[in-house]
Amino acid sequence: MPEPESEAAEDLARSFNALIHPAVWDSDIPEPDAAVVPEASTSAAAPPALPRLLEAMLFVGGAPLTAQRAMAAIRGLTDSQFAQAIASLNSDYRRQGRPYFIQAHGPGFSLALRPRFRPVLERLYGQTREARLSTPAIDVLALVAYRQPVAKQEIESIRGAESGALIRQLVRRNLIAVVQRGEAGRKEVLYGTTPRFLELFQLSSLDDLPHTADLQKL
């Protein structure tokens, strides 16, 4: 039977409260030898179920949620339990006809709209600006995508043109980001693509980038 909305809201509220504080969660992950606790002794302050905790973490957003990050926040969580909970949430979303699903981003996961609901973004915010990138900006984005992590100097050496303004534009649009800073005394930084880049081009990971003879020459 579906969980009442009020109970779901309380679960998420407790989840957010825990995420704000540095304490490690004790989720209700079953222990192999744990004694059965009578139902009457369950208090309202009991920690939320594992899928609800992971759902809250995914809802908060940010970098894709990996098993390692989840295990650091939830005491006793294992890789297999993480994978099972993610699969269970996705199954629930499909069965309930939710407009979103959990999408893989390399080793991590994030919430994303199903393709048929993506026009909602355009209705709310207008057409995606990233789709109107200039040809030079696309050139820089392609270089970062295929050569990451890559420095500004390398990009300019390949293009034969100053690229600082284009790099800043792509950073503002959250398509690329600084992934490595230079050591002390060095200003050089290295750039890479973001989860937003994968989402915009509908890629599950960088391994899905097209590989043609022309692109291999970049």
Image (cartoon, rainbow, N blue to C red):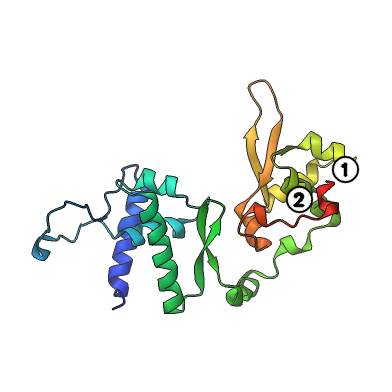
Relative to the observer, which residue lies in front, 1 or 165? 1
Residue drawn 62% across and 55% down? 205
Residue drawn at the location 63% of the way across and 39% of the way down: 179
Which of the 4 quarters of the picture holds residue 177?
top right
Q: Earlier in the sequence, mark 1 or mark 2?
A: 2
User: Which x, y percent locates residue 65?
Assistant: 48, 52
Q: Position of residue 214 (x, y in %)?
A: 86, 53
Disc 1 on helix, strand or loop?
Answer: helix
Residue drawn 74% across the image and 47% down it: 146
Q: Which residue is mark 1?
A: 159
How far apart are the alpha carbons under marks 1 and 2? 12 Å
Residue 134: image quadrant is bottom right
Horizontal side, residue 84 vs residue 169: left or right: left
- Type of residue at label 2? Leu
Q: Looking at the rendering, which quadrant does residue 10 occupy?
A: bottom left
Give the percent coordinates (x, y) of residue 40: 9, 65
Q: Viewer-proximal residue, 218 or 193?
A: 218
Describe the element under mark 2 as helix, strand or loop. helix
Q: Outermost residue, top direction?
A: 185
Looking at the image, can residue 55 be seen? no
Q: Nearer the viewer, residue 57 or 72?
A: 72
Which amino acid lies under the numbered mark 1 shown in the image of this protein? Arg
User: In the drawing, what numbered circle is on residue 141?
Assistant: 2
Q: Residues within 10 Å of mark 1 (few under 14, many from 20)?
A: some
Quarter of the picture containing the N terminus is bottom left
Circles 1 and 2: CB atoms closer than 8 Å: no
Asked if 76 appears above or below 210 in the picture, the reply is above
